[in-house]
Amino acid sequence: QVVGIGECDNHATPKRLWGVTLSVFPFRKAFRFLRTHILTQSPFTGNGVKDKALLIEALKNGRVYVAQESFLSAKGFRLSVTEGNREATMGDIFSLDQMSQLSVRIPTNGHIRVVKDGALYHDEIGQSASCAISQPGVYRVEVFAESYGKYRPWIFSNPVYIKHL
């Protein structure tokens, strides 16, 4: 299992042009470009030691997604796999008994693509998508949002690992 995170290497390098100093990719703009959203098991408490443990546990277990947010916030993205009263999300290993349901919610309309073992499994345009899962595999989600008349890369989830019971 591999956890994907996003990282933005930026130095806000000052450049002098026609006697004016400009910042190439200022921090305020660059850090909106790529974000890693971390889903902790519980809210932060304000206790540094406990909060650090929550953060590390979420990263270690792949409960994160990456978003290109220069044009649209990805806050509110949700990926879950359910079967009966059992539920899994990114980074989880889910034991498939019979038939499960993979569900995706996004903050606004987009082109939602479910990828299984590296190949397109299901795609749908809207604010949510759902598909049945009857086979084991590694399932993840890619979302493309419309901006300036084109669908552009927006959200990339970590996978849910589906195994047979």
Image (cartoon, rainbow, N blue to C red):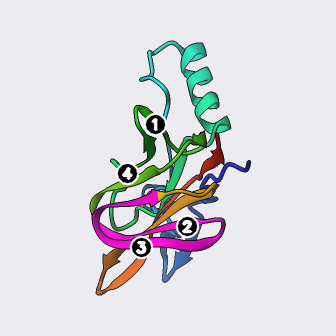
Mark 3 and mark 2: span between their CA atoms?
9 Å
From which residue to which does the magenta span run? 109-132
Ranked by sequence position, the earlier of labels 1 and 2 is: 1
The residue wearing badge 2 is 115
Q: Nearer the viewer, mark 1 or mark 4?
A: 1
Q: Is residue 10 magenta?
A: no
The residue most toward the bottom is: 149
Ranked by sequence position, the earlier of labels 3 and 2 is: 2
Q: Are marks 3 and 4 in contact (CB under 8 Å)?
A: no
Q: Across the whole image, how many numbered discs are drawn on residues? A: 4
Ranked by sequence position, the earlier of labels 3 and 4 is: 4
Could you say whether the residue bearing mark 4 is in a helix, strand or loop?
loop
Ranked by sequence position, the earlier of labels 1 and 3 is: 1
Q: Is residue 164 left or right of residue 81?
A: right
The residue most toward the front is: 98
Which secondary structure type mostly characterizes the magenta part of the structure? strand
Could you say whether the residue bearing mark 1 is in a helix, strand or loop?
strand
Mark 1 and mark 4: span between their CA atoms?
16 Å
Ranked by sequence position, the earlier of labels 4 and 2 is: 4
Quarter of the image for the C terminus: give it.
top right
What label sits on residue 87 in the rendered view? 1
The residue wearing badge 4 is 77
Residue 78, percent from left and from top: 39, 48
Q: Amino acid at mark 1?
A: Glu
Q: Amino acid at mark 2?
A: Val
Residue 58, percent from left and from top: 58, 33
Counting other residues with Cα less than 10 Å from the Cα at mark 1, is it few (<14), some (14-19), or many (20 or more)?
Answer: some
What label sits on residue 123 in the rendered view? 3
Q: Are marks 4 and 2 in contact (CB under 8 Å)?
A: no
Q: Nearer the viewer, mark 4 or mark 2?
A: 2
Could you say whether the residue bearing mark 2 is in a helix, strand or loop?
strand
